[in-house]
Amino acid sequence: MELKNVYFSYENEPVINGFSLKLEGGRRVAVMGGSGKGKTTLLRLMLGLIAPDSGEVIIDAGERPSVVFQEDRLLSWFTAERNVEEVRREGSPEARELLRDMELEEAANKLPKELSGGMQRRVAIARALAFRGDPLLLDEPFKGLDPDLRERVAGVILKRAGNASILLITHDEREAELLRCEELIRL
């Protein structure tokens, strides 16, 4: 996945100015910056959800990114376990195991509305990990998690992501350290 000299603006207000990034080979990159600096816009560009004003977005044919969006985007009519299973056509036999890793085993049969915000967040992360995509794109993945739980969840992400490339969007440099990001880009 690559961005080459990408520019993007909202209503003639530049947000992304000549940004380039190549995400490959297990690379771990954190993109940091204040609110409104274009971090989530960058993710949306990488996924092809919006088109750049200029520049190139290159996604190799075999790439299948896993994504944790800023919003959890859980399906309200499915249980936590079913939300994790749904990302794979053949189902995800490891859904229970992922929920256990996320310390949510007892919540497996609950609907999203029955879960706290932090619990919903962990289901969203488990779902992205169940998809087993590469790269793994994470937009504020630790939102709503206390510091100790962040560390444990980061460990699960690292273990489950394996050699996948990771793009972390965050406000917090400590989160970049938790996911062992080799590069920090400030917008």
Image (cartoon, rainbow, N blue to C red):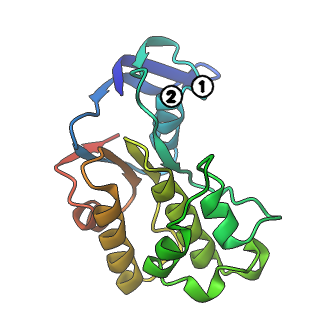
Determine if residue 178 is in view.
yes
Give the x, y percent position of residue 47: 52, 31
Amino acid type, callout 1 = Ile
> SS at mark 2?
helix
Q: Which residue is mark 1?
A: 50
Q: Is residue 114 above or below residue 124?
A: below
- Horizontal side of residue 187 vs 126, given as left or right: left
Binning the other alpha carbons within 10 Å of mark 2 as few (below 14), some (14 to 19) or many (20 upward) gives some
Q: Quadrant of residue 29?
A: top left
Q: Which residue is mark 2?
A: 45
Pointer 2 and pointer 1: residues touching (CB < 8 Å)? yes
Instruction: Report how far apart the C-alphas of labels 2 and 1 lie in the structure.
Output: 5 Å
Q: Quadrant of residue 51?
A: top right
Quadrant position of the N terminus in the picture: top left
Amino acid type, callout 2 = Leu
Q: Is residue 62 above or below residue 168?
A: above
Q: Nearer the viewer, residue 161 or 16?
A: 161
Give the x, y percent position of residue 93: 54, 64
Total numbered labels placed on residues in the image: 2
Q: Residue at x 29, y 65 (%)?
A: 159
Q: Residue at x 45, y 42 (%)?
A: 39
